[in-house]
Image (spheres, rainbow, N blue to C red):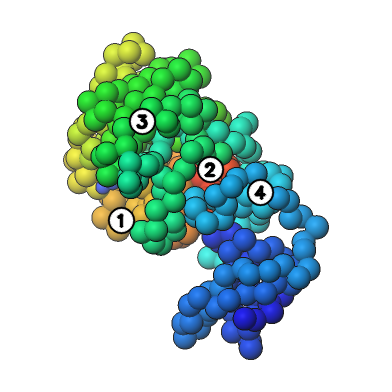
C-alpha cells in the first residue's frame, strides 16, 4: 500500500500522482486528494493503482448515485458534479490541442441537456440468465438492474429482455425498445426522423446530437451552389440534416445495412437531392470529381487513414467540417490538414456525460479561398 497525493487528471479521468518519482494513475481520485493506493500494474515508465482509502478529500468530490460505480467501469466521472465534468473535458481538449501544437479558436463546451438516462443504445452481456456488463478490462460479469446512463425505457424493460443470448444489443427511443436483429427503431432529431437498424451506427445521445448537427450546419455554411460529401455518413443523418441548404449531398459509408437505412431515411424525410454509396471512405472519395465543394467527415475513433486524408487534400473542397469522437486522432489529422486549411474554430460537445469521452466539431477553410 502507498500513500499518494493526486495533482491532476489524465485523459481517461484518472488521478495522477507520484510514487518514488514514478507517475501513478489512480481511477476515481481527484486533484488535492491524499489517498491510500494498492499498486495493480508496474510498467517501466508508470504505475497503475487502485484506490483503497481517501485520507484527504477534494472539495469537488460528490457521492456517486450509482451502486455499480466505479466497479462497472462504464463511467469514470460520477464522483464529480456535472459542471466540473464539463470543466475537466474542456481543459482536456485544450491540453491536447496545445500539446500537439494545434492553434485554433476555441468555443466553450456544449453540455448535455440530460446528465443521466441519455443513452439510446447498450450492449449487455448474459451470464446465468442475468443481464449485465463485463467489468473494465476483464470478463468478470456484473449483473445490472438499472443503469444511470441508459434511457428510462431500457431500464424499465431490462426485466423483460431475453437473458439467453450471450450478447444483447438494445436500442430505444421514448416509446419503444428493440433488440431483435431484423427490427428497426425511429429517432427524431429536430425536424427529421431516422430509421436505425440494431447494428447501424447512430449517435447515442439524441438531445446532444441535435445540438451537434446544428453546429455542423452552422460551420458548413451551405448554399445552393454546394455539392457536399458526407463522409462516414452512417444512416445518412448529417447529410439529410443539411440537405435543404445545398444543391446536392453524396453520402459514403462502408456498412451495407446503414446504407439501406440511409436510403430509407432520405425517403422518409422527402429528401431528393441526396445519394449514398456503400464502400470504403478513401476508395470511394478517390472516385469523386471536383464537383464536391464542401465535406463533412465523421470518422470512427481511429480518425482518417493516410490514404483518405491524401484523397481529401487532392479533392480540395473549400470547407471541411470534422466531427470527431477522439481528440487524439483529431489533432493528429488537424496537424496534416493545417498545411492546406485554416483551422477556423473548434467546439466540444458532451455527448457522453459521466464518462471521460468528448466529441468535437471543427470548422476548416481552404487556405487562399
Ligand atoms: C462516428 S460514425 C458516424 C455516423 C454518422 N455520421 C452519424 O452521425 O450518425 C462513423 C461511421 O463510419 C463508418 N465507417 C468506419 N470505417 C469506415 C470506412 N473505412 N469507410 C467508410 N465508412 C466507415 C462506420 O460504419 C460508422 O457508420
Name which residue lies at 36% across and 55% down. 302
Q: Are marks 2 and 3 in contact (CB under 8 Å)?
A: no
In three-dimensional space, the C-alpha distance between marks 2 and 3, rounded to whole angstroms, equals 24 Å
Q: Position of residue 348 (x, y in %)?
A: 58, 44
Q: Residue 171 sits in which quadrant?
A: top left
Numbered badge on residue 305: 1
- Residue 260: x and y in percent read 22, 26
Closer to the eye: label 2 or 1 = 2
The residue identified by callout 4 is: 64
Q: Within 8 Å of ligand 1, the CB of disc 1?
A: yes
Gap between marks 2 and 1 measured at Cα = 25 Å
Q: Earlier in the sequence, mark 4 or mark 2?
A: 4
Q: Nearer the viewer, mark 4 or mark 3?
A: 3
Q: Residues under labels 4 and 3: Cα distance?
A: 27 Å
Q: Quadrant of residue 24?
A: bottom right
**Residue 161: assigned label:** 3
| x 62%, y 74%: residue | 37
As measured in the structure, the alpha-carbon distance from the residue carrying label 1 to the one carrying label 3 is 39 Å
Secondary-structure class at tag 1: loop
User: Can you tell which mark lies on residue 352?
Assistant: 2
Q: Residues within 10 Å of mark 1 (few under 14, many from 20)?
A: few
**Mark 4 Cα shell of 10 Å, populated few (<14), some (14-19), many (≥20):** some
Residue 303 shows in this picture: yes
**Label 4 to label 1, Cα distance in Å?**
39 Å
Residue 345 position (above or below residue 154): below
In this view, the mark in front (4 or 1) = 4
Residue 196 visible, this angle: no
Q: Residues within 10 Å of mark 3 (few under 14, many from 20)?
A: some
Quarter of the image with the N terminus is bottom right
Residue 31 sits above or below residue 134 on the image: below
- Could you give the CA–CA distance between mark 4 and mark 2, rounded to whole angstroms? 16 Å
Amino acid at each position: 500500500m502507498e500513500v499518494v497525493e493526486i495533482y491532476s487528471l489524465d485523459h481517461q479521468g484518472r488521478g495522477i500522482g507520484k510514487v518514488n518519482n514514478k507517475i501513478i494513475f489512480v481511477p476515481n481520485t481527484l486533484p488535492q486528494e491524499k489517498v491510500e493506493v494498492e499498486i495493480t500494474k508496474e510498467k517501466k515508465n508508470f504505475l497503475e493503482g487502485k484506490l483503497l482509502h481517501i485520507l484527504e478529500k477534494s472539495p469537488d468530490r460528490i457521492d456517486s448515485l450509482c451502486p455499480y460505480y466505479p466497479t462497472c467501469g462504464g463511467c469514470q466521472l460520477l464522483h464529480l458534479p456535472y459542471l466540473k465534468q464539463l470543466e475537466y473535458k474542456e481543459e482536456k481538449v485544450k491540453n491536447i490541442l496545445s500539446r500537439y501544437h494545434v492553434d485554433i479558436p476555441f468555443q466553450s463546451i456544449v453540455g448535455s441537456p440530460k446528465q443521466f438516462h441519455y443513452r439510446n443504445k447498450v450492449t449487455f452481456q448474459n451470464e446465468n440468465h442475468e443481464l449485465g456488463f463485463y467489468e473494465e478490462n476483464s470478463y468478470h460479469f456484473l449483473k445490472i438492474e438499472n443503469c444511470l446512463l441508459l434511457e428510462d425505457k431500457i431500464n424499465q424493460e431490462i426485466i423483460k429482455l431475453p437473458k439467453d443470448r450471450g450478447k444483447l444489443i438494445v436500442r430505444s427511443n421514448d416509446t419503444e425498445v428493440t433488440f431483435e436483429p431484423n427490427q428497426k427503431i425511429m429517432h427524431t432529431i429536430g425536424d427529421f426522423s431516422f430509421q436505425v437498424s440494431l447494428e447501424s451506427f447512430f449517435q447515442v445521445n439524441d438531445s446532444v446530437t441535435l445540438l451537434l448537427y446544428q453546429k455542423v450546419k452552422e460551420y458548413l455554411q451551405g448554399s445552393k451552389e454546394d455539392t457536399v460529401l458526407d463522409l462516414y455518413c452512417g444512416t445518412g443523418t448529417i447529410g439529410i440534416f443539411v440537405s435543404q441548404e445545398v444543391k446536392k449531398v453524396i453520402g459514403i459509408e462502408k456498412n451495407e445495412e446503414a446504407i439501406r437505412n440511409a436510403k430509407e431515411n432520405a425517403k422518409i424525410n422527402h429528401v431528393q437531392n441526396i445519394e449514398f454509396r456503400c464502400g470504403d471512405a478513401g476508395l470511394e472519395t478517390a472516385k469523386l470529381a471536383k464537383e464536391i465543394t464542401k465535406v463533412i467527415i465523421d470518422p470512427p475513433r481511429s480518425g482518417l487513414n493516410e490514404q483518405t486524408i491524401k484523397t481529401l487534400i487532392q479533392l480540395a473542397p473549400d470547407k471541411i467540417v470534422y466531427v470527431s469522437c477522439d481528440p487524439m486522432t483529431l489533432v493528429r489529422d488537424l496537424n496534416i490538414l493545417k498545411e492546406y486549411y485554416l483551422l477556423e474554430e473548434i467546439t466540444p460537445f458532451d455527448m457522453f456525460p459521466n464518462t471521460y469521452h468528448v466529441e468535437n466539431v471543427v470548422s476548416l477553410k481552404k487556405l487562399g479561398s
